[in-house]
Image (tube, rainbow, N blue to C red):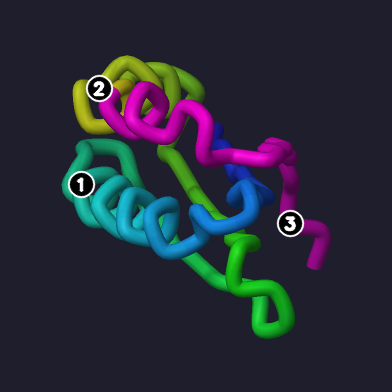
Amino acid sequence: MEIRIIVDIEAMGGFGKKLEARLISLANESTKEVGCIEYNLHKDTKNSDRFFIYEIWKSKAHLEKHNSTMHFKHFIEGSNGTIAHIKIHFVETIN
């Protein structure tokens, strides 16, 4: 079963550009993964420190594998102290 996720992430003040660069790198690597159907990074039009990621994975196992990749771990470790908040929403299509 496909897994769909929307991640809402906001940088701490002054770290928006740094976080954006790290998110772009993460997105570029994530789209190469087996099981990644869609991985789109978005930036809020009114708050340049706020980002959204829309992800679709073939299965829970593919998502779990993604969460254990070196590029994902590198993102988490390298972003320490730059993220004000992060919220992950598991969603489903209804239309």
Which quadrant of the structure image shows residue 49? bottom right
The correct choice, above or below, for 23 with respect to 65 in the image is below
Please identify the residue farthest to the bottom as the structure is shown: 45
Residue 82 in the image: x percent, y percent? 52, 40
Please identify the residue farthest to the right as the structure is shown: 94
Which residue has dot 1 on it?
A: 29
Whether the residues at callouts 2 and 3 have beta carbons within 8 Å, the answer is no
For label 3, the SS is loop
What residue lies at 32% left-to-right and 59% top-to-bottom?
21
The answer to whether one can see residue 6 in this image is no
Q: Is residue 5 left or right of residue 68?
A: right
Query: Which label sits on residue 93?
Result: 3
Q: Which residues are magenta?
A: 74-95
Tag 3: residue type?
Thr
CA distance separating discs 2 and 1? 10 Å
What residue lies at 49% left-to-right and 48% top-to-bottom?
56
Tag 2: residue type?
Thr
Q: From the image, which quarter does the C terminus lie in?
A: bottom right
Disc nearer the start of the sequence (3/1): 1
Residue 78 in the image: x percent, y percent? 33, 30
Which quadrant of the structure image shows residue 72? top left
Disc nearer the start of the sequence (2/3): 2
